[in-house]
Amino acid sequence: MKKNRYSTVFALSLATGICFTFSGGGEFALASSTMDNSSSGHDHSSHDHGDDHSGHSMNNGSMTVDVSPEQTSTSGNFVVRLDHGTDTLPLNKIHKCTIEIVDRKGSPIDGAVIMVDGGMPAHGHGLPTTPKVTKSLGAGKYLVEGIRFSMPGMWQLTFHIHVNGEKDVVIFNFKV
Amino acid sequence: MQSITWLDRQLRLALIGLLLGWSSALAAIGWTDEERALLKSLQLESHIFNTPSASNRYADDETAVTLGHQLFFDKRFSVNGQVSCASCHIPEKMFIDGLPLATGGVATTDRKTMTIIGVSVSPWLFWDGRKDSLWSQALGPWESAAEHGGNRLQYARLIVEHYGDSYRSIFGQLPKLEDGTRFPANASPNSSDAAERVAWENMSAEDQDAISTVFANMGKAVEAYQRRFLPARARFDAYVEEVLASSNGIPQPRSLSKQEEEGLRLFISEEGGRCIQCHNGPLFSNNEFHNTGVPPLEGRTPDRGRAAGVEAVLADEFNCLSKFSDADPNSCEELRFVKSSGPELEGAMRTPSLRNITHLAPFMHQGQFSTLKDVLMHYKEAPQSLIGHTELTPLQLDDRQLASIQAFLSALDGGVDAPQHLIQTPSLP
């Protein structure tokens, strides 16, 4: 009669163990098993990796980073829309994108001088290439060439826009 | 004296049950969607090797492949008639020589021989990326004093004498070299022999271009040949297919052992080995330049790597933007937007591919590490670099975990995918 109870207890424990694991308890044991982007990355602040990215105070969690293709510049002067021409950002492939700059009233801005930099804030390194705005396409649009994302993770492109004596910065985030 | 109580027994059984359930579930744990995307990005896809070589219009020409095959093995293209490409890029050894520094040429080189398997997709060649195409890369060793030690005038004459018909059928007319006043016996802008450099300078610009065109075309034929050598599908690729085919990320069947699976998890994890930061994409290399603090061989000065290499490629007479390139200048994006300055370039070396890595010892730019175990220990400890600044930070991994990563790397061995006759020595004219 007691054997029934033993096997019941045993079976229940077995089931509990399995459920516990699949509900996420297994992560306790597999120290580095899952790639969890919401956990904080490494602190690379002690290393000098060249470009410094001011304003990357956010963490590298994809859930909290704004990856919208439309961003307002830091001082609010411009709204910039970035078009990669594809939904899947290529890994390790040099490519181009276009940006469209409008002012607060929505009028396109031509004649801007634009510098590009960026990197991976969580890793503390800059871009592997030197992207540039190579063409003014008119109607506030500009061609940006020479972008490469050299590893999976969160990337940032920063555009420094100079026009009519005004200067502003707009930042885009990408998940590769 | 007393037997264990009923409660005791219940608790023991409960504990055993929990542990068994937990461990068996752990063994079956699958991959998240995020991880599956990463695995897919590492999978070998043959189409990546079909990209045309922008600066070489002959790269997929069959006759060029045959000519390139012969040039690769022809020892006459050297100062002493003893050195061919195959002297250091030995086909049976995965196209390397298995040595820390190359000794198959005239003298010893400063860096380790790199394999040619799968390199057609890299935008940069050599450890420091000082060449931006496979065809222009071949021109380096041919005129390098420590390697073949010859010069382009000598080579142009050999082409005319032995390969005239084959060359003309691919590239068109060859220059007439009989006039010794216009075309010296030996000359090159790169020669270590001052007399040969002077002889080159004394040639007319048109004659220099004519010779350099023949030289460039030799490289283009060798590129056509080398493009045929691809890394073959490995057990890892079968495993990724199994994972992607499963609905819950748990592969059935499983092409990796449990230890190899753990190694793979650590390979892609930011908190683990984070190897995928540089060893990513289908070739397990981003073909970018990174300082990993590998010390130079005993008695040698630290290698500046990319910092010197980028200056060389920008100045290279055969780069993508040169007159010998077949590329539309607008398409030379890698060169036009190259990162050409910054402290990160000092001591930075190009990430090698990890496919077939267990056959490519010794490791690093001067073969400093004999075994993969040594390599992994270096990554774990992340010592300071003697030049520039290392990108590594110490790994929080124990010996067992490092051994798992090493086990995983053997799952990248698939061998070479190439027509058998191209691996063998051809008959030479």
Image (spheres, coloured by chain):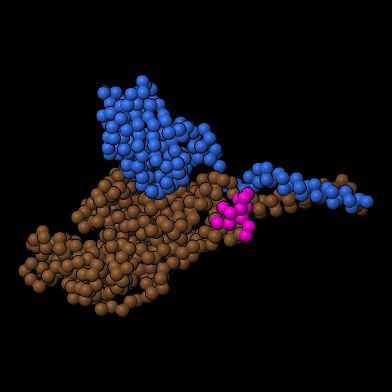
Chain colours: A blue, B brown
Image location (x, y in percent) of residue A164: 26, 23
- B97 or B283: nearer the eye? B283
| Res B192 visible | no
Identify the image quadrant of residue A46: top left
Residue B353's spot in the image, x, y percent?
42, 58
**For the view shown, which residue lies furthest in the top direction?**
A105
Residue B177 placement: quadrant: bottom left
Look at 35% across and 31% down and name the residue there. Answer: A100
Determine the residue located farthest toward the right in the rendered image: A1
Question: Residue at point 19% right, 62% down?
Answer: B213
Main SS of residues in magenta:
loop
Residue A10 rendering spot, x and y as whole percentages: 81, 50
Q: Give the position of the C terminus of chain B as an image quadrant.
A: bottom left
Residue visible at 33% across and 76% down in the picture: B426
Indicate whether residue B288 is drawn in magenta: no
**B248 is within the stretch colored magenta:** yes
Q: Is residue B283 left or right of residue B272?
A: left
Q: Which residue range is magenta in the image? A: B241-253
Name the side, left or right, on which B127 lies relative to B274.
left
Residue at image coords 32%, 42%: A145
